[in-house]
Amino acid sequence: MAGPAAARAGCAAAPSVIEAAKSKAATHPEKVVMRTESGTSALTFRRMGSDDRREVFALFSQLVLRDEYWLDSHPAYSGKSAADRTAIEAALGEALTLFVDRPDYGFVFIALENERAVACAAVSYAISLSLGKVVAQMQHLVVAEGQRRRGIGTALVEALAAQLRLIEITRLDVEVHVANEAAKEFYAQLGFKPSREERLALVL
């Protein structure tokens, strides 16, 4: 067991790691990546800004109001009923405001086609005990209805990984519902490995 001095040293090290990551993120706040899919227009990828919130809200609403897996997990994460649409929309709005106001917590990465948002993913930062470095967690990935199965989700994840490497984030984690086999297969094809853990939530 580590002694008091070691514990103090560890506590002191954490802020420096976080500050370094924040500084690197500030260096590349709006890094844009382009990718052309066969038969589609070029896709542009960047972080959500304040002016993007309306479009991103509409995209995430497709998830939080209609996705069966998200609705199944929602009570554990929020402590509230999945039937309370007003509360769900309010929480989503507050989350997007935090992403804009507190980029040190994380960001929303968006894919645009012809200047219109067609996909987005929520990303937050954490410190990994396994790596001793800052990592990122992709909590939710949404592709607009009518735009799926075009390779947009794959392109977004690949562009996000490239963006994270620029700011020296060393790992990208993702949440998948235990019953969502299609999502598990999607992420496995992108190189994600199962952690053999199950996430539990305690609302404080």
Image (spheres, grey):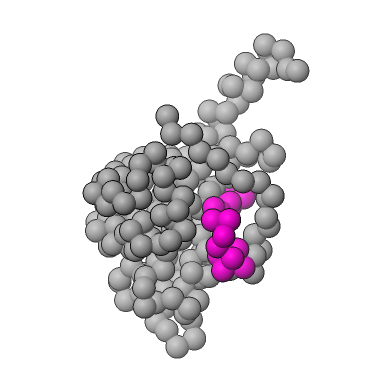
Q: Residue furthest top?
A: 4
Instruction: Decide if residue 179 is on the left or right side of residue 52.
Output: right
Query: At 37% across and 70% down in the image, what residue appears?
Result: 144
Indicate yes or no whether the magenta region holds residue 172.
yes
Quadrant of image for the N terminus: top right
Residue 107: in magenta span: no
Q: Residue at x 49, y 86 (%)?
A: 38
View extreme (right): residue: 1
- Foreground residue among 198 and 10: 198
Q: Is residue 3 visible?
A: yes
Residue 198, position as x, y percentages in the image: 61, 46
Image spot of residue 45 (x, y percent) = 42, 65
Question: Eyeballing the image, is 50 above or below 39?
Answer: above
Q: Residue at x 31, y 45 (%)?
A: 91
Q: Indicate whether 39 appears above or below 74.
A: below
Q: Which residues are magenta?
A: 166-185
Is residue 86 found left or right of 32 in the rendered image?
left
Quarter of the image for residue 5 reads top right
Q: Residue at x 54, y 47 (%)?
A: 136
Residue nearest the viewer, comparing 132 with 166: 132
In depth, the one of 201 and 3 nearer the eye is: 201
Measured as percent of width and height from the top left, residue 62 is found at 34, 63
* Percent of width and height locating residue 119: 40, 66
> Left or right of 88: which side holds 153?
right
Q: Quadrant of the C terminus?
A: top left
Q: Quadrant of residue 179?
A: bottom right
Is residue 111 visible to us here? no
Please, is residue 148 above or below residue 62 in the view?
below
